[in-house]
């Protein structure tokens, strides 16, 4: 397989619940719909295809720490008071991943090289990760065992005894998405 490494100073991973809780932590793993969205950003020709994963075969995410930041939000709906419509404002505390490091695995070199020339977004356009190293060719076994080079969290997209619900796929009639979390090495980098 061919692996591309993307990193950036910060990144926000959208919580799958999308509930406006008072405190929301970033997910430490990427759901199938997030990976599919990255694929479509990297390879726009996939936009015409039905939901699915076509090119990215493996991925792994690590980070340095989670920083809690406040964000002002408004609900979708409108409230009415006398002759006035208004939307209440709230403050939400989000956990933002600091220095995320993402490895994406592809089956062919052309796809990996194409991905290595582009930036990606984890979930919002301002959270940009850039490619930092040349494409690396290694086996999947090496990807799973070289804990110093490829540590991190990886959600394996399959339903087994150890799988849990990771969200609902809005691109596929809100069907439930399942996976199990594979942890390799120490996904949270040490601060020196």
Image (tube, grey):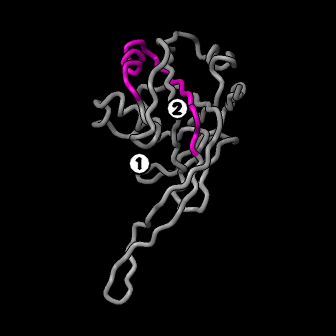
Mark 2 lies on residue = 9
Residue 169: x and y, percent? Answer: 46, 49
Rendered location of residue 94, percent (x, y): 57, 52
Could you say which disc has been placed on residue 172 in the image?
1
User: 31 or 62, which lies in front?
Assistant: 62
For this view, does 1 lie left or right of residue 108? right
- Image quarter (top left, top right, bottom left or bottom right) of the C terminus: top right
Between 4 and 94, the residue placed more toward the observer is 94
* Kind of element beneath mark 1: loop
Residue at left 64%, top 32%? 64
The residue at the point 70 percent across, 41 percent down is 162
Q: Is residue 3 above or below residue 66?
A: above
Per the rendered image, the range of residues in magenta is 96-119
As drawn, 135 above or below 20: above
Verify whether residue 98 appears in magenta. Answer: yes
Q: Position of residue 127 (x, y in %)?
A: 45, 38
């Amino acid at each position: 397989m061919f692996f591309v490494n993307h990193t950036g100073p910060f990144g926000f991973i959208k919580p799958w619940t999308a509930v406006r809780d008072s405190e929301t932590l970033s997910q430490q793993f990427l759901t199938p719909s997030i990976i599919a969205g990255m694929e479509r950003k990297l390879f726009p020709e996939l936009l015409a295809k039905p939901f699915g994963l076509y090119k990215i075969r493996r991925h792994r995410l690590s980070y340095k720490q989670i920083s809690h930041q406040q964000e002002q939000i408004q609900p979708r709906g409108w409230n009415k008071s006398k002759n006035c419509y208004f939307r209440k404002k709230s403050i939400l505390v989000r956990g933002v991943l600091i220095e995320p490091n993402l490895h994406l695995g592809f089956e062919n070199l052309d796809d990996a090289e194409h991905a290595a020339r582009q930036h990606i977004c984890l979930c919002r356009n301002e959270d940009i990760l850039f490619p930092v190293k040349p494409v690396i060719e290694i086996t999947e076994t090496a990807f799973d065992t070289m804990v110093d080079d490829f540590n991190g969290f990886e959600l394996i997209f399959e339903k087994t005894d150890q799988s849990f619900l990771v969200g609902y796929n809005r691109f596929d009639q809100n069907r439930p998405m399942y996976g199990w979390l594979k942890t390799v090495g120490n996904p949270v980098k040490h601060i020196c």
